[in-house]
Image (tube, rainbow, N blue to C red):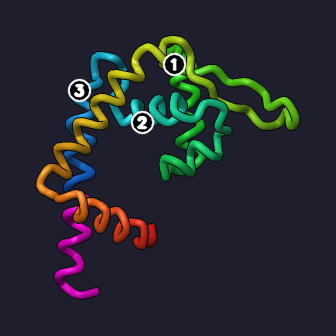
Amino acid sequence: MKTNDFQIIRTIGAITRTIQMDSNQHFKEMGLNNNLFIYIIRICEEPGMFLGQLADAIQIDRTTSFRTVQKLVKQGFFELRKDEKNHKIKRIFPSQKAMEIYPQLHVYEQAQSDLLLSQLTSKETQELALLLSKLKY
């Protein structure tokens, strides 16, 4: 890896940390710091995912994802239901509480995206999406 390549990775890391710090502060009063809001967004957008799918979607290990989902169930944001065909699989559904705050979470996510990409043209945004899709992680 060339020296310049490290700067790209460092920039991606800095962007990630900046958004995480802001979101943790922003959602602290709701009890959704430590990126818990991401789980709610994903489940509201794709209700019925099973635990492994959610872990893969968020790119986090399954044990951490499972503990986090259990926490969000206790907080009243999620409901776990057994899969109709395979009772070993538990599917995750948003509660009414999660659905009520989802619009606020989505607005925040959109605002962060708009701010981050504000200096790029539409074409540059498409190019960036293509380049990021080629990264291995």
Return the mark for residue 38.
2
- Residue at 41% across / 32% down in the picture? 36
Label 1: which residue? Answer: 77
Which of pointers 1 and 3 lies earlier in the amino acid sequence?
3
Image marks 1 and 3: residues in contact by CB distance under 8 Å = no
Q: Position of residue 91 (x, y in %)?
A: 70, 32
| Residue 119: x %, y % from top left | 11, 55
The image shows a total of numbered marks equal to: 3
Q: In this view, does 9 lie to the left or right of 98?
A: left
Q: Identify the mark nearer the N-term, 2 or 1.
A: 2
Seen in the picture, residue 96 relative to 124 is either above or below; the reply is: above
Residue type marked 3: His
Which amino acid does the dot numbered 2 rest on?
Answer: Ile
Mark 1 residue element: loop
Find numbered disc 3 in the image and state the secondary structure of the residue it sits on.
Answer: helix
Q: Give the range drawn in magenta.
A: 1-13
* Disc 2 secondary structure class: helix
Three-letter amino acid code of the residue under disc 1 = Phe
